[in-house]
Image (cartoon, grey):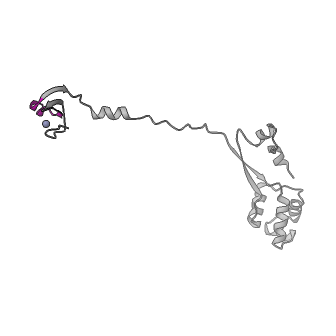
Amino acid sequence: MCDMCSSPEAVYRIELEGSMLNVCEKCSSYGRVIAKLKQEEPEKKKKKEKKVVEEAEVKPKKDTETLQIIVPNYSSLIKTRREKLGLKQKELAMKIAEKESVIHKLESGHMKPGLPLARKLERFLKIRLVEEVELDDTGISAKGIKGSDELTLGDLIDIK
Ligand SMILES: [Zn+2]
C-alpha cells in the first residue's frame, strides 16, 4: 500500500525529507527513489505457504472373522434360568417347540445347542448363550501357540 495516497500498490521505496516511504508509481515523484519494490504476487505466496498435510497412516485392513461360540456354561445357564421361571423341562420344551429330551441333554451338558436352538433359548429365557469372537491374524489360536494361558480356539469350541 502506498504510504502517501493509500493506493493499493506500492511500487517504489523513496526517501522523502529523511523518511523512507513505500509509495505507488505516481507518488514516487515526490521523493528520491531508492529502490523498486519487489511485487509479491498473492497467488504465488499462497502456494508457497500451503503445507502438505500428512495423511494419517492407514493400517492395512485385516481379515477379521466373527465366530459365534456357544458359551461353555450353557447347560447351567439354561437350567438355572428355567428353574427361576418355574418351568419343568417338559414345559420349556413345549414353549420352544423342542422335545423334552433335548432340554434334558442341554441341561446335562450332553448336547451343545446349535445356533438356531441357542438363539431360540436366548430369546425365550432372555439369557446369553452365544458369544461372538473376532478372529484375525493375532487371533485366539495364535495366542495359544505363543504359549500363553489363553485358550486356543479349539479349546473354546470343544468345551463341554
Ligand atoms: Zn501514491
Q: Is residue 29 magenta?
A: yes
Find residue 153 and report its image quarter: top right
Camera-side residue of 11 and 32: 32
Q: Quadrant of the N terminus?
A: top left
Q: Quadrant of residue 39?
A: top left
Find residue 15 and report its image quarter.
top left
Image x and y of residue 144, in percent: 80, 40
Observer-nearest of 75 and 43: 43
Q: Which residue is located at x 19 percent, y 26 percent?
A: 36
Location of residue 157 with respect to 52 vertically, above or below = below
The residue at the far left in this view is: 30
State the image coordinates of residue 81 (x, y, percent, origin top left): 81, 67
Q: Residue at x 16, y 30 (%)?
A: 14
Asked if the magenta segment contains residue 46, the reply would be no
Q: Quadrant of ligand 1?
A: top left
Range of magenta residues: 21-31
x and y percentages locating residue 52 in the rendered image: 44, 34
In screen coordinates, is 119 left or right of 104? left
Q: Position of residue 106 (x, y in %)?
A: 86, 60
The answer to whether 113 is drawn above or below residue 80 in the figure is above
Tally the marks: 0
Residue closer to the observer: 160 or 117: 160
Q: Residue at x 76, y 43 (%)?
A: 140
Residue 66 vertical position relative to residue 80 in the rendered view, above or below: above
